[in-house]
Image (cartoon, rainbow, N blue to C red):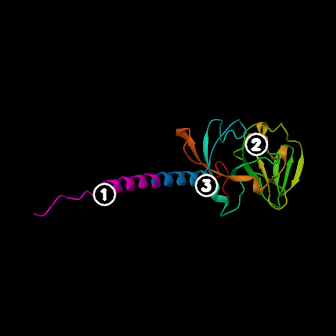
């Protein structure tokens, strides 16, 4: 008589290992995607009134590092950067880019001039600039940028700490995701189109 007793297979054990391997691969993929997204598009929340009326404290923005990997900062960009006198206790700042390398920035009679031309600044708070708006002149060298807050009377910016070097710029603010009723693109928000 022939014994037809089935031989036990190890398939269920292999399937368990396959499921475990698949789960680990999926978790690794999620972590990698999250890390890549955080490196490319870090999040930032606003503190203080320096960018009013464009942004208010408590709003959340996505910042794009990618924009400046493939291009250079432009007039009107809202940039996130480290102060030139950065210490780990200081948060990153967010300001509007006013001057590019080679520009001459001047404050004359509380108005801002770039290369001798008064700036059209519809984003600027409708209040006379009284704080740190004394007549001054800055000549920007290679890789130097000049930034100012839209709320000139309540902003620490290049008037205080000087020009910022290109290496200090983290990225450009591209999208507001909080509060929900103000979700949307913020690229050059409020900046006049040529």
**Residue 120 shows in the view:** no
Q: Residues within 10 Å of mark 1 (few under 14, many from 20)?
A: few
Q: Nearer the viewer, residue 138 or 167?
A: 167
Q: Residue at x 62, y 52 (%)?
A: 187
Give the Cα distance between marks 2 and 3: 21 Å
Residue 159 position (above or below residue 153):
below
Of tags 3 and 1, which is closer to the observer? 1
Of tags 2 and 3, which is closer to the observer? 2
* Mark number, residue 74: none
Q: Please name the predominant secondary structure of the magenta segment in the image.
A: helix
Furthest residue to the left? 1
Q: Which residues are magenta?
A: 1-25
Q: Nearer the viewer, residue 42 or 6?
A: 6
**Residue 110 place in picture, x, y as percent:** 84, 43
| Mark 1: secondary structure | helix
> Residue at label 2?
88
Is 96 situated left or right of 15 in this image? right
Instruction: Please tell me how many numbered marks the rendered image carries.
Output: 3
Whether tag 2 and tag 3 are in contact, CB under 8 A, the answer is no
First in sequence: mark 2 vs mark 3: 3
């Amino acid at each position: 008589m022939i014994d037809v007793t089935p031989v036990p297979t190890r398939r269920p054990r292999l399937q368990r290992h396959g499921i475990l391997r698949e789960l680990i691969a999926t978790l690794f993929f999620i972590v990698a995607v999250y890390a890549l997204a955080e490196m490319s598009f870090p999040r930032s929340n606003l503190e203080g009134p320096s960018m009013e009326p464009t942004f208010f404290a408590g709003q959340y923005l996505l910042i794009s590092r990618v924009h400046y990997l493939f291009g250079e900062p432009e007039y009107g960009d809202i940039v996130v950067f480290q102060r030139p006198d950065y210490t780990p206790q200081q948060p990153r700042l967010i300001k509007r880019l006013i001057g590019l390398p080679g520009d001459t920035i001047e404050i004359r009679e509380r108005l801002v001039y770039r290369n001798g031309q008064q700036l059209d600044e519809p984003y600027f708070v409708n209040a006379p600039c009284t704080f740190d708006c004394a007549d001054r002149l800055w000549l920007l060298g290679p890789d130097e940028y000049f930034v100012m807050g839209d709320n000139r009377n309540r902003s620490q910016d290049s008037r205080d700490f000087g020009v910022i070097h290109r290496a200090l710029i983290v990225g450009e603010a591209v999208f507001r995701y909080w509060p929900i009723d103000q979700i949307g693109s913020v690229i050059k928000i409020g900046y006049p189109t040529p």
